[in-house]
Amino acid sequence: DTEVTQTPKHLVMGMTNKKSLKCEQHMGHRAMYWYKQKAKKPPELMFVYSYEKLSINESVPSRFSPECPNSSLLNLHLHALQPEDSALYLCASSQAVGSKNIQYFGAGTRLSVL
Amino acid sequence: AQSVTQLDSQVPVFEEAPVELRCNYSSSVSVYLFWYVQYPNQGLQLLLKYLSGSTLVKGINGFEAEFNKSQTSFHLRKPSVHISDTAEYFCAVAMNTGFQKLVFGTGTRLLVSP
C-alpha cells in the first residue's frame, strides 16, 4: 500500500476564514512534506517534517502553519489567506528524508480563496 | 544548485506511436533523477527513478528512461503510447548527499489522440 490520503479534495474559503488540510499515511514513513502547485506549474516545496519535527520551512508565510501530531498525520492550518494562495496543495511522504527516498504523493486538496 | 529543463511544454502524438520526452539537468555534483506523472486532478505518481547502476531504467506502464551523464540528460521514452497516457510529466532531480529537495522541471504535457 503506497497511499497518501488527503482531505478535503476541494476547499473554498474566504480571506478571514480558518481552515485545515489533512494528510494521512500508514506506510510507516517518517518524513512528510507539503507542496504547493499552481496551475500549469511544477510543485514547490513548502515544509518538510522528519520524525514529527519540522526540518525545513521554505520561507513560507506565517498564514500557513504546519503541524505533525503523530508519525501518520500531517496538517496544514490556514488563516487569513490571500487569493493568490489558491492552488493545489499536495502532501507527500517518504521512508526518510534522504534524497534517494521515493516520495509518494497524495491526490491533493484544491484550494480556492475568495 | 541544480536545475532541470524540459524544453517541450507539450508533445502531441497519435495512439500507438513512439514518444520521447526530453529532460536535461544541470548540477555540479552527482544526482538522483526521477520522472513523475500527473493525471488530471490527481497527485504525482512515480514512473521511474535513477539512483545508480544501469543507465537504462524501466518504469511502470511501459516507460523507460536512459541516464546520460555526459549529456546530462534523462529522456523518457515509450515505444507505443495509449490514450490513457495523456497527462503531465515532470522530470525531477535531487543531489545525492543528505536531504536535498526535489527540483522539478516545468513539465511536459503529453497529448495522445486516436
Image (cartoon, rainbow, N blue to C red):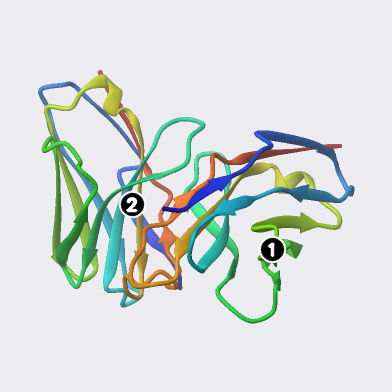
Q: How many marks?
A: 2
- Pointer 1 with pointer 2, Cβ within 8 A: no
Q: Secondary structure at mark 1?
A: loop
Single out the residue that lies furthest toward the bottom.
B53
Spot occupied by residue B9 in the image (x, y as percentages of width and height):
65, 34
| Residue A35 in the figure: left or right of residue A14 | right
Spot occupied by residue A34 in the image (x, y as percentages of width and height):
29, 51
- Mark whose residue sits in front, 1 or 2: 1
Residue type, numbered disc 2? Gln
Location of the C terminus of chain A (image quadrant): top left
Name which residue lies at 58% across and 53% down: B25
The answer to which image quadrant residue B69 occupies is: bottom right
Mark 2 surroundings within 10 Å by alpha-carbon count, few (fewer than 14), some (14 through 19), many (20 or more): many
Name which residue lies at 47% across and 41% down: A42
Residue named by callout 1: B70
> Above or below — where is B9 with respect to B15?
above
Mark 1 surroundings within 10 Å by alpha-carbon count, few (fewer than 14), some (14 through 19), many (20 or more): few
* Residues marked 1 and 2, same chain: no
> Above or below — where is B44 with respect to A30?
above
> Above or below — where is A105 with respect to A97?
above
Name which residue lies at 26% across and 20% down: A83
Q: Secondary structure at mark 2?
A: strand
Location of the N terminus of chain A (image quadrant): bottom left
Question: How far separated are the C-alphas under marks 1 and 2?
Answer: 40 Å
Residue named by callout 2: A6
Name which residue lies at 76% across and 64% down: B62
The answer to which image quadrant residue A71 occupies is: bottom left
- Identify the chain of the residue marked 2, using the numbered disc in the image: A
| Residue B52 in the figure: left or right of residue B29 | right
Q: Is B2 in front, or is B12? A: B2
Q: Is B13 in front, or is A25? A: B13
